[in-house]
Amino acid sequence: MQRLVFKHLDGKYSSVQKPVIAGVVASGNLEILIEPSPHSGACTFEVNTSVTGFDATWKAVVADFHQAWLFTDTKVSINDMGATPAVVRLRLDQAAELVATSKSSKLGG
């Protein structure tokens, strides 16, 4: 198991009012939890993955997501069981859509 942490300080929107979750922790899938977290405007990503050695890929996927949504004062927790970058981005966008629509239901699985 590998743990990666990324922090972005250039967000613009603190629209996360309550925790949302998307996906499930299962082989080839992952779970995303987005929750409000006062970080002086930062958006922090914590990745727990069963697959090691893809630090640069995670960094790129997380940075691309952050540039699309620009969350501030937010914590994004990712529990991964070998999802591909496309699935990671899909689940991140699903969770962000839940934030945008202020729904708290669970997607994916």
Image (cartoon, helix red, strand yellow):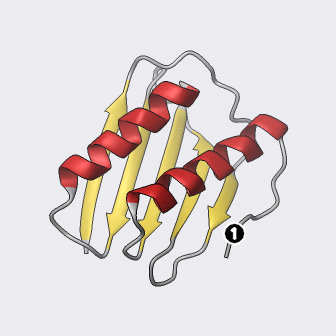
Find residue 8 and report its image quarter.
top left
Name the quadrant of the C terminus: bottom right
Specify the farthest residue to the front.
Answer: 86
- 99 or 61: which is nearer to us? 61
Find residue 53 and report its image quarter.
bottom left
Does 44 sit above or below residue 70? below
Does 35 sit above or below residue 47? above
In the figure, is residue 102 to the left or right of 41? right
In the figure, is residue 35 to the left or right of 60? right
Disc 1 residue type (three-letter) = Gly
Whether residue 87 is visible: yes
Number of numbered tags placed on the structure image: 1
Q: Position of residue 65 (x, y in %)?
A: 48, 37
Find residue 9 and report its image quarter.
top left
Name the quadrant of the N terminus: bottom left
Specify the farthest residue to the left.
Answer: 53
Give the residue pinned by disc 1.
108
| Residue name at image x 53 percent, y 28 percent | 68
Q: Position of residue 99 (x, y in %)?
A: 73, 40
| Residue name at image x 69 percent, y 69 percent | 108
In the figure, is residue 106 to the left or right of 31? right
- 22 or 3: which is nearer to us? 22
| Residue name at image x 65 percent, y 61 percent | 22
Does 95 sit above or below residue 50? above
In the figure, is residue 15 to the left or right of 82? right
- 109 or 6: which is nearer to us? 109
